[in-house]
Image (tube, rainbow, N blue to C red):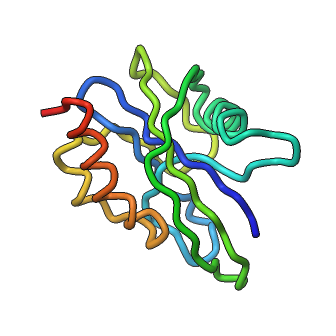
Amino acid sequence: MIRVVAGLIIFENFVLVAKRKSTSLGVKNLWEFPGGKVEPGETDQMALQRELFEELGIHIKTCFPIHTHQFKNLKGQTIELCLYGTFIQDSKFECFDHDEVQWVSKDLIDQVDFLESNKVFISPVQDWLKARGFP
């Protein structure tokens, strides 16, 4: 099984979503929560910190578990995908690993054309944000 972490990056009332590179096999023009594989010896938090810095130049300090699910990728491998929420202090980022990255209002998150593996996060994200007092 391959363990992958993704970040629900929150700034004010917005969340950051990233469009997969058009060269990605079978998933071009679809959006995801950014992140990547957990390497041997890393905790989920360490992997998320590394991935968000490598992909977006974002530094995070803490992350909070939201939801985990398993699925099979196009190669038939089992993926365990874990979404973590994190808050950042400013909205600046760089785009190193995606075709496009943008801030989306938390109220419009259910209208984003997500990868199937990320669509399952919509309801848990909305519940998690509501539980933390986001209007």
Work out whether 132 lies above or below 123.
above
Q: Residue at x 53, y 31 (%)?
A: 63
| Residue 124 horizontal/vertical position (percent) | 33, 54
Please identify the quadrant where the N terminus is shown.
Answer: bottom right
Please identify the quadrant where the C terminus is shown.
Answer: top left
Residue 74 is drawn in which quadrant? Answer: bottom right
Q: Residue at x 28, y 42 (%)?
A: 104
Asked whether, in this view, residue 113 is left or right of residue 46, the answer is: left
| Residue 36 horizontal/vertical position (percent) | 66, 50
Residue 132 is drawn in which quadrant? Answer: top left
| Residue 110 horizontal/vertical position (percent) | 23, 58
Q: Residue at x 46, y 49 (%)?
A: 18
Q: Residue at x 47, y 50 (%)?
A: 33
Asked whether, in this view, residue 9 is left or right of residue 2, the answer is: left
Identify the residue at the far left of this view.
Answer: 135
Work out whether 60 lies above or below 84.
above
Q: Nearer the viewer, residue 100 or 55?
A: 55
